[in-house]
Image (cartoon, grey):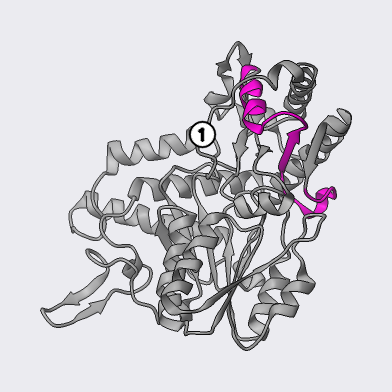
């Protein structure tokens, strides 16, 4: 097991006091905190090596370019890619999926082709493929979940046909925490000649990822959900697919040569990284990857499952007042718990928890269709990471006990309308 107390020393923000209480940060599925090592790596770049990459022979530009390319290589090793040049810098998972959908989809999809998505998809995986389907006259179909909260694999198999060209899916649900059987989904996609596109936003930060073994064709994930900076993410793709695609965005650094009549696109991955990239962000993400590797991804997953199991136990002690969503077996899910307090709006519960210094997420979590499938409009979500503790869960459970005791009074509070889409 990991040394959580030692890890927490690297996160000064966790020593904050919020509303008179020590901060408990349970909103890690939205974004994680950053250790000081990541902040220091970014600061060091700006103070000692700052220059543009691939645009100069002077010392600073050469240093910046080397750090930038080393970051690609570090991330490639983290996901066990075949080569660092399959690792494309994007701004986040959303841009990564858009890049895959529009470059591959507009070239390969035809009227009548089918794209299989899932009811548990995040909007960022669902909407780009819907737009590409609209442009190409392809058809989108949705794989349902079981009542327990697992992907319905029998339904998926029954939907496959020669028309299936894409299966795009979340590796892990950002609402239910369900960890999908990636190898099985990939195998089914390839059995009919379709590509498998994995939304790894919730998986890659929390569990070992090996693209060689898993076999997907594209994988997208975000840096800010894995101790890295905001505004940086990764799209990994199979080389044989990427080499046949033209840029989604074009401009500086995407070309080898341009005439008034023609263009020769750059090698991978630069043809997909238009303009001045987020150099500092990529360097920060590489440092975050090093941090996670030192802790160990298997140990992080086991730590979070321990917290999940303990949370389910503590919430069960609160009785019928709490409705928890998703499969109860912690071996099939990650460290995400979505729930509602019966008789209280999820926003009211979230605001009340904040008075105890507890940060959770409330709303639709960018997964509205999944909430509608569950028969609700939103939920309260607690999500864990390597720096969270069982003691924090105890305080969380006791805060919920107090909120339940005050339910009649809290139910009369006006509900502030806020954006629930993200």
Which element type, helix, strand or loop, lies under badge 1? loop
- Residue at left 20%, top 79%? 263
The residue lying furthest to the left in this view is 260
Q: Is residue 320 covered in magenta?
A: no
- Residue 225 percent across, percent down from the top left: 54, 45
Task: Say if 155 sits above or below 112 in the image.
Answer: above
- Residue 266 percent across, percent down from the top left: 29, 74
The residue lying furthest to the top in this view is 20
Q: Is residue 332 covered in magenta?
A: yes
Tally of numbered tags: 1
Task: Say if 33 sits above or below 353 in the image.
Answer: below
Residue 86 visible at all: no
Q: Is residue 254 left or right of residue 218?
A: left
The residue lying furthest to the bottom in this view is 162
Q: Which residue is mark 1?
A: 418
Q: For the magenta stretch, what is the residue range?
A: 326-355
Q: Nearer the viewer, residue 293 or 99?
A: 99
Q: Nearer the viewer, residue 36 or 257?
A: 257
Task: Say if 100 sits above or below 59 in the image.
Answer: below
- Residue at left 53%, top 25%? 13
- Residue at left 60%, top 54%? 204
Residue 295 visible at all: yes
Q: Nearer the viewer, residue 206 or 159?
A: 159
Q: Is residue 124 left or right of residue 67?
A: right
Neighbor class of circle 1 (other Cα within 10 Å; few <14, some 14-19, many 20+) is few
- Residue 51 percent across, percent down from the top left: 23, 48
Quadrant housing the N terminus: top right
- Residue 172 percent across, percent down from the top left: 67, 55
Q: Is residue 421 left or right of residue 99?
A: right
- Residue at left 42%, top 35%? 40
Task: Say if 68 sits above or below 219 in the image.
Answer: above
């Amino acid at each position: 097991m990991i040394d959580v107390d030692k890890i927490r020393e690297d996160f000064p923000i966790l020593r904050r006091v919020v509303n008179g209480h020590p901060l408990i940060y349970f909103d890690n599925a939205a974004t994680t905190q950053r250790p000081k090592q990541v902040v220091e790596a970014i600061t060091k770049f700006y103070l000692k090596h700052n220059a543009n990459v691939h645009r100069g022979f002077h010392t600073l530009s050469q240093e910046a370019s080397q750090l930038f390319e080393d970051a690609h290589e570090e991330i490639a090793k983290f996901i066990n890619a075949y080569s660092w040049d399959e690792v494309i810098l994007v701004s986040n998972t959303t841009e990564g999926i858009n890049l895959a959908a529009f470059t591959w989809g507009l070239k390969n999809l035809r009227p009548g082709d089918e794209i299989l998505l899932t009811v548990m998809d995040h909007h960022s995986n669902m909407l780009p493929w819907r737009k590409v389907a609209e442009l190409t006259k392809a058809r989108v179909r949705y794989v349902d979940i079981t009542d327990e909260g697992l992907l319905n694999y029998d339904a998926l198999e029954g939907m496959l046909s020669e028309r299936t060209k894409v299966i795009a899916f979340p590796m892990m649900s950002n609402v239910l925490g369900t960890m999908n059987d990636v190898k099985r989904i990939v195998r089914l996609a390839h059995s009919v000649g379709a590509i498998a596109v994995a939304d790894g936003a919730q998986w890659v930060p929390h569990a070992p990822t090996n693209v060689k073994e898993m076999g997907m064709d594209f994988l997208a994930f975000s840096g800010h959900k894995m101790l890295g900076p905001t505004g940086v993410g990764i799209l990994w793709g199979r080389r044989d697919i990427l080499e046949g695609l033209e840029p989604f965005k074009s401009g500086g650094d995407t070309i080898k040569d341009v005439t008034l009549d023609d263009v020769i696109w750059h090698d991978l991955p630069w043809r997909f990284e238009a303009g001045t990239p987020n150099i500092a962000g990529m360097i920060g993400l590489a440092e975050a990857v090093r941090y996670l590797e030192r802790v160990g991804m298997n140990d992080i997953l086991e730590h979070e499952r321990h917290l999940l199991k303990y949370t389910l136990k503590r919430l069960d002690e609160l009785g019928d007042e709490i409705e928890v969503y998703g499969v109860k077996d912690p071996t099939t899910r990650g460290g995400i718990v979505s729930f509602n307090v019966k008789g209280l709006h999820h926003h009211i519960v979230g605001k009340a928890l904040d008075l105890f210094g507890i940060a959770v997420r409330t709303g639709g979590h960018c997964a509205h269709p999944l909430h509608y499938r569950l028969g609700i409009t939103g939920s309260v979500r607690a999500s864990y990471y390597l720096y969270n503790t069982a003691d924090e869960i105890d305080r969380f459970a006791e805060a919920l006990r107090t909120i339940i005791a005050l339910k009649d009074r809290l139910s009369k509070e006006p509900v502030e309308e806020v954006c629930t889409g993200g």
